[in-house]
Amino acid sequence: MDVQQLDSIQTETVYLTDSAAATVRNLLAQKNVPDYGLRVFVAGGGCSGMQYGMALEAEAREYDHVIEHDGVKIFIDPTSMMYLDHATIDYVDSIMGGGFKIENPNAVTSCGCGTSFKGKDGGGYEGAAGGGGCGCG
């Protein structure tokens, strides 16, 4: 394998900021499940066609991508990874409240609240509102 081939190999991954990792560790401690991980997934729905979801889970499922950052395990199924590859998960605390925020380079449009998006490959509902107004609650 030559250097050009090595440069073209890409690894699917998702990034977790230090703030998000600290928040997940705190959640796991509060719920007394320190060995659990954070499942991050994409599902149909939301005003832009696809929406993000998160849950705490005891272990990875078969075929999951397992990513570890600063002691936090992230579980992502292969289908969701197609939409989340190279995304960054952050935790933002503002005057309006705190929450996880996903910066996704695979999203071409997203709703105003940032919880739903339309993917580069056309993933998402064609009739959904793009970019501006948001019907999400």
Image (cartoon, rainbow, N blue to C red):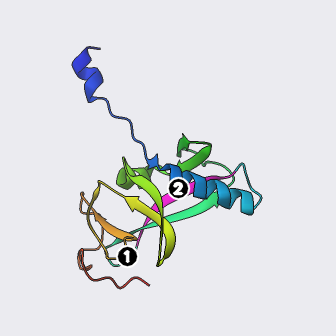
**In front: label 1 or label 2:** 2
Give the image location of residue 8, x and y in percent: 26, 29
Distance of label 1 from label 2 (alpha carbons): 18 Å
Q: Is residue 116 above or below residue 80?
A: below
- Residue type for callout 2: Ala
Please tell me how crowded label 2 is: few (under 14), some (14-19), or many (20+) other residues with Cα within 10 Å.
Answer: many
- Furthest residue toward top: 2
Q: Earlier in the sequence, mark 1 or mark 2?
A: 2
In the rendered image, residue 35 lying in the magenta stretch gets the answer: no
Quarter of the picture holding the C terminus: bottom left
Query: Mark 2 — residue?
Result: 20
Residue 113, numbered circle: 1
- Residue type for callout 1: Cys
Q: Give the residue at x 29% y 73%.
A: 125
The secondary structure type at the circle numbered 1 is loop
Q: Left or right: 59 with respect to 49? A: right
Please tell me how crowded label 1 is: few (under 14), some (14-19), or many (20+) other residues with Cα within 10 Å.
Answer: some
Judge by depth and name the residue closer to the eye, 42 or 98.
98
